[in-house]
Image: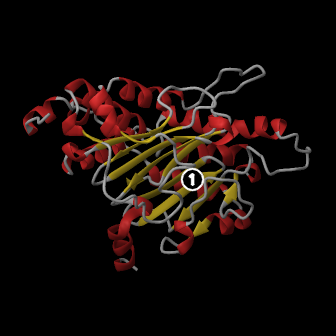
Amino acid sequence: MTIKPLCLLCTTAIFLFLPKAESQDIVEAAVKFMKSLDSAQHAQALYPFDTDERYTYHYFPVDNRKGIAMDKLNQSQKQAAMDLMKTSLSEQALKKVRAIMNLEILLKAIEKRKPDDHFRDPGKYFFTIFGMPAAHSVWGWRLEGHHVYFSFSAEENKLVSGTPGFLGTNPAVIQDGPDKGMEILKDEREAGFGLLHALSTEELRKAILDSVAPADIITGTVRKAMIGNPSGLRFTEMTSGQQTMLLDIISLYVHRFTKLFAEDMLKQIQGAGIENLWFAWSGYQQPGIGRPHYYRIQGPTIVIEYDNTQNNANHVHTVVRDLQHDFGGDILLEHYKASH
């Protein structure tokens, strides 16, 4: 099916009529956080903007993360860290981040680890500042730990990059205990299956790449998110209702960030041509534990991935990659070097 470009815009009100965002005050929050740290903590948390460490990207457990850990902060410092998070993440994303951190307690119990074993630990989430936060400078900050990773960059007191943006959950659905049935990334699952189940037989033949889901997100932890040529079902091959569902999925992921940044990111996606977006699926076509599945949305400026394959398909990885501005992008780095 071919649809005229004008009609494409008619189906994308979500891209065109976003609410005006409030000021982020990201510099003020970062400075407040840095001032709350003592000299030793300050040395741990602060790195130059042009360091290779800024490109370190792990969403799995590791023991040598840089920055200052959450469990090394006192209560007022934790509040300052939370205030910084609020300048860059939406309220809904913050709730998911907190819930994912708390899953470490459940994992420790499931794996029967000893009390002094900190491989699973909700305090092992790290904050790192890159460059000196100031109203007219280029700088960034990072939040990372098991199943949480966001790399933010700012210029002129404005957030200009927030990716890679990763959230994962293990278990995807809690099976026992007082939180039985809780599913932190339920919206992401339901949105993907909702679009899949709205496709016709012919559309499914194009969208489904493989009956077997990949073992993890394909973009992995590389600095440059590379998948290759888009494949699956193209936006222009969808009905208007399916197109709206696809845009709703993109909105769900992009609105992990604050409104101001989400608006900029959506404009960037639209500017590159929403007719160039693709939806692809692999694995089982019905949800449930024991049914590995994967979906991807890809366009000229963005890749979104959802993978649920590990732990008998009860372990989800999701990510947003900005193909132009991951880790701040090359242009922002040039701005930083030119000012130093």
Depth order, front residue of 311/319: 311
Can residue 193 be seen in this snapshot? yes
Which x, y percent locates residue 202?
27, 31
Residue at 19% of width from left, 47% of height from top? 273
Crowd rating for badge 1 (residues with CA inside 10 Å; few <14, some 14–19, many 20+): some
> Could you tell me which residue is drawn at 64 percent across and 38 percent down?
100
Inspect the image, locate mark 1, and give the three-letter code of the amino acid beneath it: Lys
Q: Secondary structure at mark 1?
A: helix
Left or right? Give the position of 290 relative to 294. right
User: Residue at point 61% right, 53% down?
Assistant: 59
> Which quarter of the image is occupied by the C terminus?
bottom left
Q: Is residue 21 visible?
A: no
Where is 55 relative to 37, above or below?
Answer: below
Nearer to the camera, 219 or 62: 219
Q: Position of residue 1 (x, y in %)?
A: 14, 33
- Residue 339 image-quadrant placement: bottom left
Query: Can you identify the residue that label 1 sits on?
Result: 32
